[in-house]
Image (tube, rainbow, N blue to C red):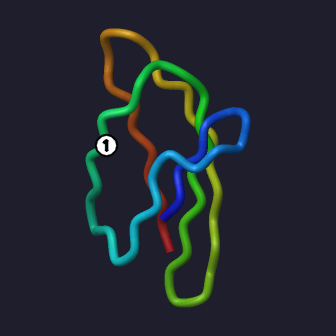
Amino acid sequence: MVIAEGAGKTVLDVNNAGPYLLAKLPRGAYRIDVTYEGRSQSRRVDVREGGPAMIAFYW
């Protein structure tokens, strides 16, 4: 799993994460790229002040 900020800079790169991963990120826009058994998915998420953001990936 790779989490990158809006400008494309990687802020977190984790191997073998899951089935859950909790990350404390500063407010901002992020792109999350994950791969499982050779299949990749991407999502964008906006982290806002004062509340959680949840993203789920299903295979």
Q: Which residue is drawn at 28% across and 68% down?
A: 19
Give coordinates of residue 34: x percent, y percent. Answer: 54, 66
Rendered position, 18 above or below 6: below
Q: Which amino acid does label 1 sit on?
A: Ala
Residue name at image x 48 percent, y 66 percent: 58
| Residue 51 x, y percent position in the rendering | 32, 16
Residue at image mark 1: 23
Q: Which residue lies furthest to the bottom in this view?
A: 37
For this rendering, which residue is in front, 37 or 15?
A: 15
Q: Residue at x 55, y 22 (%)?
A: 28
In the depicted structure, whether residue 2 falls above or below residue 9:
below
**Towards the viewer: 48 or 59:** 48
Assign a secondary structure to mark 1.
Answer: loop
Q: In the figure, 49 relative to 41: above or below?
A: above
Residue 6 percent location from the top left of the image? 68, 33
Question: Residue 24 or 50: which is nearer the viewer?
Answer: 24
Left or right placement of residue 18 versus residue 1 in this view: left
Q: Please identify the quarter of the rendering in which residue 33 is found.
A: bottom right
Q: Is residue 54 left or right of residue 35?
A: left
Which residue is rendered at x = 34% and y = 77% of the image? Answer: 16
